[in-house]
Image (tube, rainbow, N blue to C red):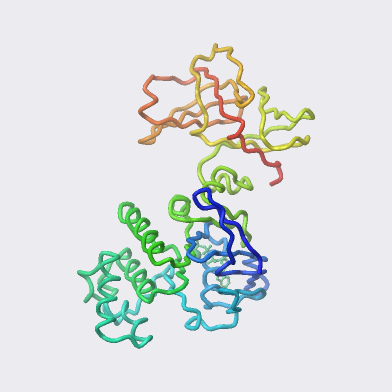
Amino acid sequence: MMHQTIKRDGVETIGDPYLSLEGINKKYGLVEVISNLNLEVRKGELIALLGPSGCGKTTTLRMIAGLISPSAGKITVEGRDVTQIAPHGRDMGLVFQSYALFPHMTVAKNVAFGLEMRGLSRADIASKVAKALAMVQLGHLAERKPRELSGGQQQRVALARALVIEPSILLLDEPLSNLDAKLRDEMRTQIRDIQQQLGITTVFVTHDQVEALSMCDRIVVMKGGLIEQVGTPHEIYERPATPFVASFVGRTNRVKGRRMADGFIRIGSSTIRSTKPAGQDDVVVMVRPHRIHIDWNAASTEQPGETANQTAAVLSRITFVGDVIQYHFDVDGSEFIVEESTKKSQASHRQRDKAVLSWSVEDTLVFGADQ
Ligand SMILES: Nc1ncnc2c1ncn2[C@@H]1O[C@H](COP(=O)(O)OP(=O)(O)OP(=O)(O)O)[C@@H](O)[C@H]1O
Ligand SMILES: [Mg+2]
């Protein structure tokens, strides 16, 4: 069995994977929707499958649950091959993207169902159901039917129903998509707390990068049935492996450049550095908007140190977005957006104002133009 290294709070631990997907392929007819997917999840880990609509997140989750079979490949739990095992033999709790509650049963009965199937006593069932419903703040609606609930309430019943059986693996398919912003925030914290308290290995499907970054130990970024990158939120954000990851997770500026023989990169009339090795090629340069510093004193002749890049820019537009102000700059025909907190940006600036933009070499992400 392969070992994997996971950094948690800066401490590296090595362990066997708890859930592992090896060489998974899924075809519908002739169309391949998942291609050679390999993934290892450690015990107690919360891992996000993150990617745009149609990239194969639900398909992957349903294969883990055993609801659909892979066309090729193997799924193991603690080294046991479960690829051919039926869903109920896998000890997994699942929250579907479409909740799939039993319409004729009350909320309490929906949540109790899995426990009844396992033959628990009535007293045990009642107390576990009450606890699970309290966890999702639905104790007061225990006697309602699903059709008498809002979408967000149904979603929470589905979550309680999955948690109540204390599964060894929890599979969540966009479990917060129908909640309002405030409730979603609360539920994120709650799911994370419950998951950590019970130590449940969890695969969490989402297309919301904030959710993935804020809740998960690691993120799997998917695109078109392929894994683009697997890493901690910090790695995915600070060291995106591809331009797709850089622009899907967090906002970023993207400009074309050319790497010269001396290793420096030309963007417009400016020359900048990156930490990546040299090579002469067309490249794409990406910098996060809030990592750029604006010096409005454009006459400044101060040269950047070894660790900073800079370029002259002309202000073209200002957008107010609540907490932040976005300054849109023209840099030799390319647009650079810089974000500053509203509080910091008190001075008034106008179109065509000149400035010097600077950012650290560390924050300069460079990719091949064909990536
Ligand atoms: N039963 C099916 N038959 C044929 N194609 C399917 C079937 N189910 C899914 N697909 C296709 O497989 C691809 C992946 O679908 P999947 O539901 O896994 O996407 P997803 O990442 O969960 O997207 P979303 O964020 O919209 O839920 C899509 O292109 C979809 O059209
Ligand atoms: Mg889906």
Q: Seen in the image, is 188 located left or right of residue 205?
A: left
What is the residue that sits farthest to the left in this orientation?
Answer: 140
Image position, residue 109 (x, y; %): 28, 80
Toward the viewer: 254 or 13? 13
Vertical placement of residue 223 versus 305, above or below: below
* Residue 276 placement (x, y as % from top left): 69, 37
Give whichever of 56, 85 is nearer the camera. 85
Q: Which residue: 62% across, 62% down?
A: 225
Total number of numbered discs in the rendering: 0
Residue drawn at x 26%, y 77% is 108
Q: Please give the name of the residue rendered at 45% of the width and 69% of the height, measured from the top-left corner.
A: 170
Q: Residue at x 54, y 48 (%)?
A: 248
Q: Quadrant of residue 127?
A: bottom left
Q: Dividing the image into 4 quarters, which one contains the N terminus?
A: bottom right
Q: Is residue 151 above or below residue 214?
A: below
**Residue 198 at x, y = what percent?**
39, 67
Classify 301 as above or below 163: above
Q: Whole-percent x and y of residue 270? A: 66, 23
Residue 263: quarter of image: top right
Q: Nearer the viewer, residue 349 or 201?
A: 201
Decide if residue 91 is on the left or right side of residue 280: left
